[in-house]
């Protein structure tokens, strides 16, 4: 990604710190990202959940993205959060971890160089599902209050029923790669939701939820050639219908032919939009249209 126009350079005083955070049933791995003096309390904590189709992935995946995000705005501190993978324990273990982590963060602000003012959840793919779901859980369980949610190419439909999930690009090479993405999503849901009845639960499939009011503002990013595009945009439309301030953007086709292309897309093409949205999470700035 070096040399991409508009890419935020990494700060020389960037700090990455590994730590353990509290999950629903025990400690979880996490990594803290901040630029500047560690003793300074930041206004905004961004909790990021990694991808991997619920069955894989790790906190390492967002290193470049989150490092550049905090380098570009020192009022933010980011936390890449682990959660229980479906190979260890299926739904609802991961979402319970996600909510427990937010409660832990509120109680341990000083460890995170955060003043507790604003809390934003974010994630990519399966992690974006968790970010969307934890916004529902925080509303239903009385907190912690969220200032925003950032959903990057989210997995929201266990039925895999949208047109973008079924239709492959014309280009054979691109189609094969996108087909593998769709197969990965299907395999992930089989591991995460072995009980078919859970597939309609709003904490597993937020797209099917009939209760989407009183949620935090959302930034939802889809991608032109991504199988998850339609469910992301459908969820955005439902949030808007429920009166939630929501920005939906379709990004250019991500470089899926490259290793890590989906996450590179989030970092390179969406960093400006994500940073602007988070800055506006307190209502002092207008999120991008």
Image (cartoon, rainbow, N blue to C red):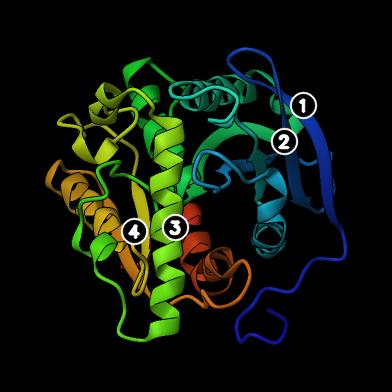
Q: How many other residues sit within 10 Å of disc 4, few (<14), some (14-19) or many (≥20)? A: many
At 62% from the left edge and 20% from the top edge, which residue is drawn? 23
Q: The N terminus lies in which quarter of the figure?
A: bottom right
Q: Earlier in the sequence, mark 1 or mark 2?
A: 1
The residue under label 4 is: 228
Q: Earlier in the sequence, mark 3 or mark 1?
A: 1
Nearer to me, 283 or 276: 276
Q: Earlier in the sequence, mark 4 or mark 3?
A: 4
- Of tags 3 and 2, the one toward the viewer is 2
At 64% from the left edge and 77% from the top edge, which residue is drawn? 7
Q: The C terminus lies in which quarter of the figure?
A: bottom left
Evaluate if marks 4 and 1 touch, with contact meaning CB atoms under 8 Å apart: no
Q: CA distance from mark 3 to mark 1?
A: 28 Å
- Of tags 4 and 1, the one toward the viewer is 4
The residue under label 3 is: 277
The residue under label 1 is: 20
For mark 4, give the secondary structure. Answer: loop
Q: CA distance from mark 2 to mark 4?
A: 26 Å
Nearer to me, 278 or 262: 262
Residue 209 lies, in percent from the top left, at 20, 32
Q: Which mark is residue 30?
A: 2
For mark 2, give the secondary structure. Answer: strand
* Res. 81 image quadrant: top right
Nearer to me, 112 or 32: 32
On the picture, is 212 further left or further right than 147?
left
């Amino acid at each position: 990604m070096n040399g991409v126009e508009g890419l935020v350079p990494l700060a020389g005083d960037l700090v990455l710190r590994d730590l353990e955070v509290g999950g629903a049933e025990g400690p979880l791995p996490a990594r803290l990202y901040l630029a500047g003096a560690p003793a300074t309390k930041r206004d905004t904590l961004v909790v990021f959940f990694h991808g991997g189709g619920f069955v894989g992935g790790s906190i390492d995946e967002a290193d470049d993205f989150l490092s550049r995000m905090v380098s570009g705005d020192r009022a933010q501190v980011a936390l890449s959060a682990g959660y229980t993978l479906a190979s260890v324990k299926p739904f609802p273990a991961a979402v319970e971890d996600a909510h427990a982590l937010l409660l832990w963060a509120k109680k341990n602000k000083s460890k995170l160089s955060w003043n507790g003012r604003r809390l934003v959840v974010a994630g990519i793919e399966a992690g974006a599902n968790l970010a969307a779901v934890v916004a529902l859980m925080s509303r239903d369980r009385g907190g912690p209050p969220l200032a925003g949610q950032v959903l990057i190419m989210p997995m929201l439909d266990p039925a895999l029923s949208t047109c973008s999930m079924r239709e492959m690009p014309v280009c054979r090479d691109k189609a094969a790669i996108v087909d593998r993405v769709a197969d990965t999503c299907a395999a992930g849901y089989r591991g995460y939701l072995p009980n078919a009845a859970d597939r309609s639960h709003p904490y597993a499939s937020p797209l099917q939820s009939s209760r989407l009011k009183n949620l935090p503002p959302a930034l939802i990013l889809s991608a032109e050639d991504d199988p998850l595009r339609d469910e992301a945009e459908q969820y955005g439309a439902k949030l808007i219908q429920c009166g939630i301030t929501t920005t939906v953007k379709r990004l250019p086709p991500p470089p899926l032919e490259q290793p890590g292309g989906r996450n590179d897309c989030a970092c390179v093409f969406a960093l400006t939009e994500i940073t602007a949205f988070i800055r506006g999470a307190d209502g002092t700035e207008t999120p991008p249209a």
